[in-house]
């Protein structure tokens, strides 16, 4: 049990409860429909706006939850426009992972890194927001170029989008107000949790508890919104990695890496960035990061070198590397699963042709960013 990182698990539980209650208000459907109308029903503009909304929600909530909320509405929009949903689905996969990279709570690897190192919400925002914005804009520009012929709809179908009334999708106004109040307070809490000397999990659980009190929610109902298989997966993973540490496997690996990089933070950072990106593309980034964290901690203790830039390299590599393949991150698998239930299959090879080159581009941008701001 000592190997289990309860800060990560409790942070996930708190955010799952908050989002599970908030989604019942219909606010996320409202945002998607409002975005489509703001774009005037023009498919390429809708793709752009929904991708930006997906990225922001992924940063403030988490990318897995955002995928569950945005994709069903995407199918409703593309059905009305009578166009292929594929460009939108791929854009949402990429945007959710890119947006989730920017904050402590946006992507599970970041939660694990923050919990293990003591890095706070503002540390992630300060160090990762700039490259995330650049990578997101570059990615969307290239996607619009790739799918320009698929993002065309006739005027009649555009008008059908403009006829939608986003207000109709708000199911409970009082619940909406209470949920947004608590969500706002929780996000503020994340910004100042280090100043308050509180763990990020404490903030998330306080927010969840406050929302349960305000809406008088039955705790049993709220607990149903928690993705328990994901939490048990994390718990088992922490124990496996703890066993590797106890048996000296992590130490042996760190010594092997040190032979390659010496005690140079630059060489170590470059190796970690690219190795984590390529590794996370083909092995889900959560178990990959779980193994890398104790390895890097051991390297830092052995050499005494500053590991700050190396942690950012790991965060960028693992989160963005998840965009490389359809199995690289949890959000990818979830979006593919929802799509299949809507009779739209995202084939592994079709995604690979788009996602992998864009992932490599994002890592090149990350490498340049780390060099200019940390390694030069």
Image: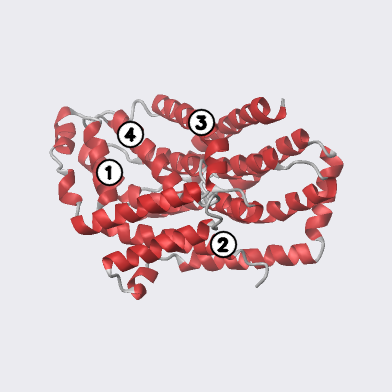
What distance separates the C-alpha of mark 4 from that of mark 2? 34 Å
Mark 1 nearby-residue class (10 Å; few <14, some 14–19, many ≥20): some
* Image position of 84 with respect to 155: above or below: below
The N terminus, quarter of image: bottom right
What distance separates the C-alpha of mark 2 from that of mark 1? 31 Å
Mark 2 nearby-residue class (10 Å; few <14, some 14–19, many ≥20): some
At 49% from the left and 43% from the top, the residue drawn is 97
The outermost residue toward the front is 196
What distance separates the C-alpha of mark 3 from that of mark 1? 23 Å
Mark 3 nearby-residue class (10 Å; few <14, some 14–19, many ≥20): many
The residue tagged 2 is: 7
Indicate the position of residue 243 as horizontal and vertical percent values.
73, 67
Labels 2 & 1 near each other (Cβ < 8 A): no
Mark 4 nearby-residue class (10 Å; few <14, some 14–19, many ≥20): some
The residue tagged 1 is: 31
**Toward which corner of the image does residue 8 lie, by quadrant?**
bottom right
**Secondary structure at numbered mark 1:** helix
The residue tagged 4 is: 49
The disc at residue 135 is 3
| First in sequence: mark 3 vs mark 2 | 2
Indicate the position of residue 39 as horizontal and vertical percent values.
25, 31
What distance separates the C-alpha of mark 4 from that of mark 3? 16 Å
The disc at residue 311 is none
Mark yes or no: residue 291 visible.
yes
Would you say 90 lies left or right of 285 here?
Answer: left
**Secondary structure at numbered mark 2:** helix
**Secondary structure at numbered mark 3:** helix
């Amino acid at each position: 049990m000592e190997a289990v990182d309860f800060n990560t698990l409790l942070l996930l539980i708190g955010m799952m409860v908050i989002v599970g209650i908030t989604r019942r208000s219909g606010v996320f459907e409202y945002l998607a429909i409002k975005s489509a109308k703001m774009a005037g029903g023009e498919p390429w503009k809708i793709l752009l706006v929904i991708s930006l909304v997906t990225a922001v929600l992924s940063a403030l909530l988490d990318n897995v939850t955002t995928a569950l909320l945005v994709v069903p509405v995407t199918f409703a929009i593309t059905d009305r426009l009578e166009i292929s949903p594929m460009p939108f689905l791929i854009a949402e996969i990429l945007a959710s992972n890119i947006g989730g990279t920017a904050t402590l709570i946006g992507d599970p690897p970041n939660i694990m890194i923050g919990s293990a190192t003591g890095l706070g919400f503002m540390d992630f925002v300060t160090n990762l927001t700039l490259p995330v914005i650049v990578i997101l804009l570059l990615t969307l520009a290239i996607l619009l170029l790739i799918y320009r012929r698929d993002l065309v709809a006739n005027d009649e179908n555009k008008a059908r989008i403009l006829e939608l009334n986003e207000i109709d999708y708000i199911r409970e106004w009082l619940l909406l107000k209470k949920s947004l109040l608590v969500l706002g307070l929780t996000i503020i809490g994340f910004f100042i949790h280090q100043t308050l000397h509180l763990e990020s999990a404490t903030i998330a659980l306080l927010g969840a508890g406050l929302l349960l009190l305000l809406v008088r929610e039955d705790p049993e109902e709220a607990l149903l919104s928690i993705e328990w298989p994901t939490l048990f997966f994390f718990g088992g993973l922490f124990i496996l990695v703890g066993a590797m540490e106890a048996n000296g496997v992590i130490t042996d690996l760190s010594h092997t890496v040190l032979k390659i990089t010496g005690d140079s933070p630059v060489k170590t950072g470059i190796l970690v960035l690219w190795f984590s990106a390529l590794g996370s593309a083909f092995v889900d980034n959560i178990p990959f990061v779980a193994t890398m964290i104790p390895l890097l901690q051991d390297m830092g203790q052995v050499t005494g070198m500053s590991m700050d830039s190396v942690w950012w390299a790991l965060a960028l590599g693992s989160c963005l590397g998840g965009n490389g393949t359809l199995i690289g991150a949890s959000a990818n698998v979830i979006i593919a699963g929802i799509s299949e239930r809507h009779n739209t299959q995202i084939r592994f090879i079709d995604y690979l042709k788009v996602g992998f080159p864009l992932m490599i581009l994002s890592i090149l941008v990350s490498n340049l960013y780390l060099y200019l701001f940390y390694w030069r």
